[in-house]
Image: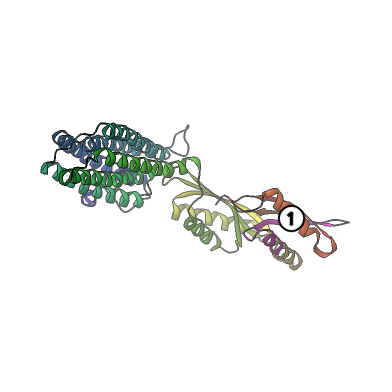
Amino acid sequence: MIELLSHWLIRNRENTGDPAVRLAYGRLCGLVGIGLNLLLFGGKLFAGTVSGSVAVTADAFNNLSDAGSSVVTLLGFQLAGKKPDPQHPFGHGRIEYISGLVVSGLILLMGVELGKSSVEKILHPEAVDFSLLAVGILVASIAVKLYMYLYNRRIGRRISSAAMEATATDSLSDAIATTAVLAAMLVGRFTSLMIDGWVGLVVACFILFSGYQAAKETLGPLLGQPPEQELVERIRQMVLSHPPICGIHDLVVHDYGPGRMMVSLHAEVPAHGDILELHDVIDTAEMELKRTLHCNAVIHMDPIITDDAQIVQLRRRVAKLVRQVDSGMTIHDFRVVPGPSHTNLIFDAVLPFGEHITEAEAARQIRERVRQMDGGEYYAVVTVENPYV
């Protein structure tokens, strides 16, 4: 249904990098979600009232909260689509992440409320009346929720939406919760066991876990997280495809919401090259990144000496020594400053996060190893830093 509606209602639907297309998808999925959840709420509320099942009734109000979640998602897409203004020069895209976080909060709240109702039913158990109508409503609800999970996940991945991914997680948890409620009703029908409250408690725990996972996924972009390795490699390959750029470092990807990305990096170029020609190459690389990745790109030009065999050899030797300190370390901005008594080797070293040594200890070991080169001729002036990617 969603695919059919998108064919009718969304122009240029394949261009998901276009904010207008993302907004249209968000509106469509949000409105469909609201309608389906309201239908499920009415059906389950009726079934819970007829059967006297607290689990079915709680599941009905869970669907009502899902309708509210869809409203939040719809509002989030609407606000995130606003154009940049003087107060928000990078746009309002992160509102979409905030709406996903609100949805996660609603999931957690529903889990707590369901848990309280379930504990009350455990302490004061009551028999659940079996009804074929209630069973039919629950089976239909499971099918609808699985469909909602599939289309929210598919569209969420298509347009890279954390809010829709959270909504998909919520729909899957609802399908599992309703399956558990249905199982409890069938057990009560064919045995003397009254497990309605216990099943409700298990469902509540599952909903709480789903809410935690959804919150974790939406908090990451808000707090700042590294870009996906696939994107990093794509940026690296695109920039290095422009000779004479021979290396990049200090790559930073700023996420201001889906489709609103800023990329900055340092590109190493031969120091002996013509500066106007090199500047033109840098401009071309920036424009390609913007055109291909739909981002704003800023590239800082770092000149390095490539035509002096002694300096090139020193750089290789130092890079090898640094890898002996930690195999994942790399160096950049390498310079050689000769003096009357010794030669300073000035460079930066990148230490990956989570390694077994600190930045200070890595710097100390690097200085010691460089000091031992060629009878103490070289001193290392090194800055150890962590990567941004």
Q: Which residues are magenta?
A: 319-345
Is residue 383 rendered to the left or right of residue 229?
right
Classify residue 122 by image quadrant: top left
Of residues 23 and 360, which is closer to you in this image?
360
Q: Amino acid at mark 1?
A: Gln
Farthest residue, direction right: 340
What residue do we see at 28% from left, 48% from top?
A: 149
Q: Is residue 52 above or below residue 151?
A: above
Classify residue 345 by image quadrant: bottom right
Q: Give the structural element (helix, strand or loop) at label 1.
A: helix
Is residue 387 rendered to the left or right of residue 70?
right
Q: Is residue 323 magenta?
A: yes
What residue do we see at 42% from left, 45% from top?
A: 217
Of residues 193 and 10, which is closer to you in this image?
193
What percent of the width, then of the height, locates residue 15? 34, 52
Q: How is the image coloured?
A: rainbow
What residue do we see at 70% from left, 65% from top?
A: 316
Farthest residue, direction front: 192
What percent of the width, then of the height, locates residue 11? 27, 49
**Residue annotated with mark 1:** 365
What percent of the width, then of the height, locates residue 58? 25, 35
Q: Is residue 112 above or below residue 320?
A: above
